[in-house]
Amino acid sequence: MESRKILTAVVVWRRFLVLALFSLILSLCAEDQVSPGEYAPKSGQPGKDVVWVANPSTMVEKLLDMATVTPQDYVIDLGSGDGRNVIAAAKRGARAHGIEYDRDLVELSKRNAAKERVSDKATFEKGDIFESDFSKATVIVLFLTPEMNIRLQPKLLDLKAGTRIVANTFAIGAWNADQTSIDATNCERWCTARLWIVPGKVTGTWKLAEGELKLKQVYQTFTGMLKGANGSAPVAGRMRGEEIFFSSKDTQFTGRVAGDAIEGVARTAGSDRKFRATRIGN
């Protein structure tokens, strides 16, 4: 009888040791993932102008792919949250910067960048995106509300022609995206990627060999009239960054806008010739 009691005590003690060891392992793993007192954001938590929702990892890469981010780019994420877009861009070799109003998210982003060893390329600041200067960006990343995108639209349209803007899900007012793509395989929610390329500004009156060209632009499209020695003809065209494409009668014009000058090639009946236009009025 006594031996049975001893055997039972040994079994119970062994079970206790196993459970204690298992609990210790779990606690050590938890410490590796989140340090004591470390800030951990929650999806849906309120912010200054919007609740915070993390950009799905597949969309992070999809947006950067759509913007064709390279090491030559300077990527700025407006409302950078936990820094994942900025860090992913830095891993591609680009200089990347995040502007975020929540100080805790900014500090978390800095820690995340350090863990990923990209602190030299990924930087963050606490700031208001509506008051910040992001004019030097070659790529802008957005995951904001439609209302916030509309408020940002004037500054976005005033960026250097050719700047790429990518956004998850939400449009920028009436400015139609140049490209839209939906990830229906690896993404469950917030899965629409949109790309805009800031167009050059061509509204105004232009002088070229064919006559006088008057254009009125709406975002990346424009219409107008070409008035020459043989009469007037309507014009319709499109901008893609600094590149310009338009046609009038049987002539197609392809060129590049640089301030108040357009240079390119005009094709009529399969024959090419160079053309140059100079803006002479607004």
Image: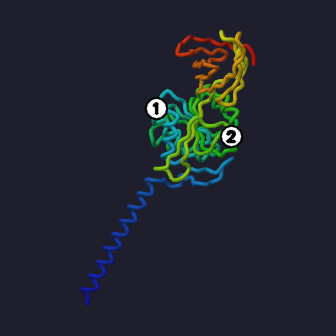
Q: Is residue 155 left or right of residue 5?
A: right
Q: Are marks 1 and 2 in contact (CB under 8 Å)?
A: no
Q: Name the residue under label 1.
A: 93
In the picture of the structure, the residue carrying the numbered disc 2 is 173
Question: Closest to the observer: 91 or 176?
Answer: 176
What crowding class fits label 2: few (fewer than 14 Cα within 10 Å), some (14-19), or many (20 or more)? some
Q: Residue 92 location, x and y as percent?
A: 45, 34
- Packing grade of label 1 (10 A; few <14, some 14-19, many >=20) is some
* Residue 110, visible in the rendered structure: no
Direction right: furthest residue: 282
Is residue 163 depicted above or below 181 in this figure?
above
Q: Where is residue 48 in the image (x, y as percent from the top left)?
A: 68, 47
Residue 263 seen in render:
yes
**The image quarter in which residue 15 lies:** bottom left
Going 57% across and 52% down the picture, which residue do you hit? 41
Seen from the viewer's position, the closer of residues 119 and 20 is: 119
Mark 1 or mark 2, earlier in chain: 1
Residue 236 position within the rendered picture, expressed as x and y whole percent measured from the top left: 66, 25
Image mark count: 2
Circle 1 or circle 2, nearest the eye: 2
Q: Determine whether 199 is above or below 208 in the image.
A: below
Callout 2 amino acid:
Gly
Q: In which quarter of the image is residue 246?
A: top right
| Residue at position x 51%, y 45% in the image | 59
- Choose top left, top right, bottom left or bottom right for residue 192: top right
Q: Residue at point 65% right, 13% down? A: 277
Instruction: Name the amino acid type tagged 1.
Output: Gly
For the residue pair 12 and 120, the one nearer the viewer reads as 120
